[in-house]
Amino acid sequence: MNIHLPRADVTERTLAIVGELKELEGPLLPILHEIQDEFGYVPEESLPLIARELNLSRAEVYGVVTFYHDFREHPAGRHVLKLCRAEACQSMGGDRLAERAKALLGIDFHETTPDGAVTLEPVYCLGLCSCSPSAMLDGEVHARLDEAELEALVAEARR
Amino acid sequence: MSLIHEIDYGTPASKSEKLVTLTIDGREITVPEGTSIMRAAMEAGIEVPKLCASDMMEAFGSCRLCLVEIEGRAGMPASCTTPVAAGISVSTQTQRLKDVRRGVMELYISDHPLDCLTCAANGDCELQDMAGAVGLRDVRYGYDGANHVKARNNGEINRQWAPKDESNPYFTFDPAKCIVCSRCVRACEEVQGTFALTISGRGFDSKVSAGMNEDFVSSECVSCGACVQACPTATLTEKSVIEIGQPEHSVVTTCAYCGVGCSFKAEMRGEELVRMVPWKDGQANRGHSCVKGRFAYGYSSHKDRILNPMVREKVTDPWREVTWEEAYAHVANEFRRIQYQYGRDSVGGITSSRCTNEETYLVQKLVRAGFGNNNVDTCARVCHSPTGYGLNQTFGTSAGTQDFDSVEHTDVAVIIGANPTDGHPVFASRLKKRLRQGAKLIVIDPRRIDLVRSAHVEASYHLPIKPGTNVAILTSLAHVIVTEGLANEAFIRERCDWSEYEDWAAFVAEPYHSPEATEAYTGVPAELVRGAARLYATGGNGAIYYGLGVTEHSQGSTTVMAIANLAMVTGNIGRPGVGVNPLRGQNNVQGSCDMGSFPHELPGYRHISDDATREIFEKLWGVTLNNEPGLRIPNMLDAAVEGTFKGLYIQGEDILQSDPDTKHVAAGLAAMECVVVQDLFLNETANYAHVFLPGSTFLEKDGTFTNAERRINRVRKVMRPKNGYADWEVTQKLAQAMGLDWNYSHPSEIMDEIAATTPTFALVSYDYLDKMGSVQWPCNEKAPLGSPIMHVDGFVRGKGKFIRTEFVATDEKTGPRFPLLLTTGRILSQYNVGAQTRRTDNVVWHAEDRLEIHPHDAEQRGIRDGDWVRLASRSGETTLRALITDRVAPGVVYTTFHHPTTQANVITTDFSDWATNCPEYKVTAVQVSPSNGPSDWQRDYDEQARQSRRIAGKLEAAE
């Protein structure tokens, strides 16, 4: 379960995380990961704080955050379902699975169901090309999916 | 005349001394090792197509247009990122390369609007040039698919498209035209060092983003213009180009703002200035600029400019426009009457650091030869006069020791009482570049200036001294160096007077100079002082840069000497990367001092009492010169109040606003019978003037400015003076009206006279400057190419002189009534009293002066951010709005002085430097309290200013 409620003390937590990790070599990515783990997304108000603490410009931090699709600007649903959209999965029926998932959830990629249960995201790629098509639900990978297995995944996520 | 096109070599020059020979397109080429193939080709005149490369920044290799083939190597490497190698054979044009380039270009154009005819960059677009260069004839992809070009796609809103950002007053950002070459981002990072831009997203979503996808004006952007200059398309374009069109000719000239003295190409269409573009061959700025020089020239055509001479009997009368002849006759008659009535010494003149060397020279000549006294002074009195005095005493020249290029060799930079990112932005960018390469930084300043910590720059030491304790901290630094055995004895024995050194070393070694002892009143922890001293003494090439935070104190001259002592004791003089570098405030403050603007000095810093020097001028001018120094500005004002000084000719200076103790200045001016102001605008001083002579801008005249590195730069006329005459012509006409036989037909003749009379300028002439670009004085037989670095083989005065620097606290002390210390400074977008920058769009960034106050002090007084506060000192009071920040320490408040309504100098006292009378602007004891609005003085002043600016026959006065 990914239960991430936006917390009021974004500033405090951000500064604490930066304080813990800033001595690492190349600390920005570990910090961003930690922040996403903490809040479920990277709150915009964290970025100027990170910039200030690491002595970077706001623009630089923003550039890095937006470069990686994995960093979210908004809180996700309680579950995140990622479908691999890379070449191998596409050639093994990934397109059809994607359409099916969208229909089942009634949302498009990058959207969250109205009840806040599931966020659907494309991913390129999960490194499971030899057992395509693949998906990831809340950090757990699932391979050689067919329609039935996808439906089961979606059902699990919706619960 | 034509448009100057500078060659872009694609990548910066290599500094290697090892040469490599290779073949490009069958031609044998020899270049320094480390040169890119692209640059080597360009040096041989072979232009490889490129889009993302520029010699202002490092190679990036993203556009994939500059591909070449190298015999024996696989693939098609980018010529910008591939260095030359001995013996390789490079082809820049093969069928394979042509096909690939055309394909790449076709993809670029597939996401770029085809509105070339109506595009602002038409005629100055590298994308267009490259399409031509690669022979693009067809684009097979339409706009039906994803694109950044159209606001709507197939009837739907196109989310990839973004509207133009017009938030910056000087340029627009049109993402639809962007090819994402990253040149703007890299220029902001590498050239300017602000890092305000980034590429957001990735792949087809990549977009240039200011800050966090903000508009330019709300982002970290400082509007230096480097991105606009770097942009190969119309994405970033000057609004003036959009409005006017492409320029057709250009003239190289020198910026008239700060003492960095940047070279610009004034790009013109007829007599209309289209834009100012920094000139890559400019040896002070190396192709960079700041928001003022690049964009803030609009004042030259502002409606407030006064274009006709005006006269009035009393300062309470409205102005009456007259002819030039009437004005000259009036001034000549009045000055002669006053001298007849009150004596020869009852009149004087003030030269301007904003005007050219030639104009300054003429004003001092008019005073000495025409008025027959030495009552001439200049605005350097209130800024860098202690620099002249202090460095002359210790080294033997009244000037900085280095050129700006020197910073590229600096290992430890010490910044004292200067805020380069605001006051000298182009130098700051060059310094930041060096800091990013690993040089260390020590900042000595009461306030946490941006250089202390900002993106990618962090000072190793910030010594946040209490205002007014410069001498104590510098002597403490010397104490550590001497007592810890860090002195460079070999250097001192060879270059300096050893016995004076021994005396000085014993003096600084006294325990009461130790950081532990001075901590009590400097407020700086002793270990910081020790650390900073060790770093400066042992960190390699140490260079000191300082500003008005050093000079504008009661011990300004002592501080300059203390700085010189530090440089000598560590051997940091006489080679690249070291030295003592005053950051001069005004464009030509160095020049105005060089030209004999001080009452005791003839041009070239030769004392007026020196018979041989006087004789040179007496012979040439056909007059007898008074051998007694004349009055300084404060003395003139004192004498005026006493009733013995009655007439003053002020060229291009607003003493009422810029000089200390405004009420005293006003009283002095009010007591005079003929005050002549020559200026662009009815400045504050003109409120007390009887004659107003319209001035001309730097765009309207020929001449020279001398910058902080002693560099004599040409100023070239690009348009006729709107007021009819250049300032030197006005001074000449005035001299003629007073019966002097002056017949200069061009400023070059004035420079010839300067060269003939002043040994340090002996070889300077306009022809020589045109040939050399610029030279740094001394420029004479001994140094025909000028002198980038001084005191190379020994000090000008012979042996370097160590001088004891005893700290004497200023009489301006805090107490129960005035518990806070006020210090003043500048901001990037405004310039000094703001007469020019307030009349440009720069007000977007700084519309009013604010009082910076620490949260602790604010809370005690019940002041919230943005509240009106009353700022009072022993001299007077004013009001302004508070800005709560921890940039200032508790007990210290800070404000800028760019706006006349603030009247910051009503607050400052008349304490001044013991040697030069330079006012103590940087320390005033004050109290701050909540207020409802403007003070009585401000209201009275406003009313008086409004009254005195009336012009007969015109409905409303200027401003």
Image (tube, coloured by chain):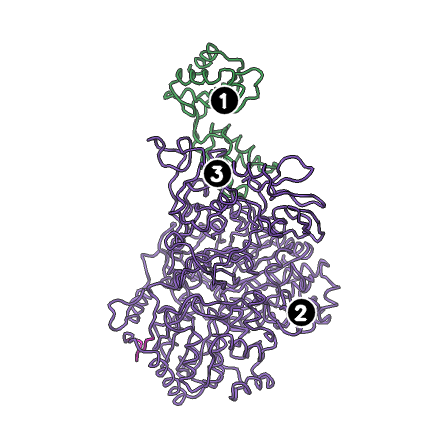
Q: Amino acid at mark 1?
A: Arg
Q: Which chain is purple in the picture?
A: B
Question: At label 2, which amino acid type do we have?
Answer: Phe
In the foreground, B311 or B474: B311
Q: Residues within 10 Å of mark 2 (few under 14, many from 20)?
A: many
- Above-or-below relation of B506 to B125: below
Q: Chain of mark 3?
A: B
Residue B584, position as x, y percentages in the image:
53, 65
Q: Residue furthest top?
A: A148
Which amino acid type is marked by label 3?
Answer: Tyr
Q: Residue at x 65, y 51 (%)?
A: B14
Quarter of the view holding residue B819: bottom left
In the image, which is nearer the foreground, mark 1 or mark 3? 3
Residue position for label 3: B108
Q: CA distance from mark 1 to mark 3?
A: 26 Å
Left or right of A57? Residue B79 is: right
Residue B225 image offset from top left, x and y in percent = 47, 52
**Would residue B312 be counted in the magenta stretch?**
yes
For marks 3 and 2 on the same chain, the one whose residue lies earlier in the sequence: 3
Circles 1 and 3 on the same subunit: no
Whether B356 is drawn above or below A38: the answer is below
SS label for mark 1: loop
Residue under pointer 1: A85
Q: Is residue B10 left or right of residue B937?
A: right
Question: Which residue is labeled 2 in the image?
Answer: B802
Q: Which residues are magenta?
A: B309-316
> In the visual, does B253 lie left or right of B116?
right
Q: Nearer the viewer, residue B586 or B914?
A: B586
Chain to which the residue tagged by mark 2 belongs: B
Is B398 above or below relative to A50?
below
Q: Nearer the viewer, mark 3 or mark 2?
A: 3
Q: Is residue B327 visible?
A: yes
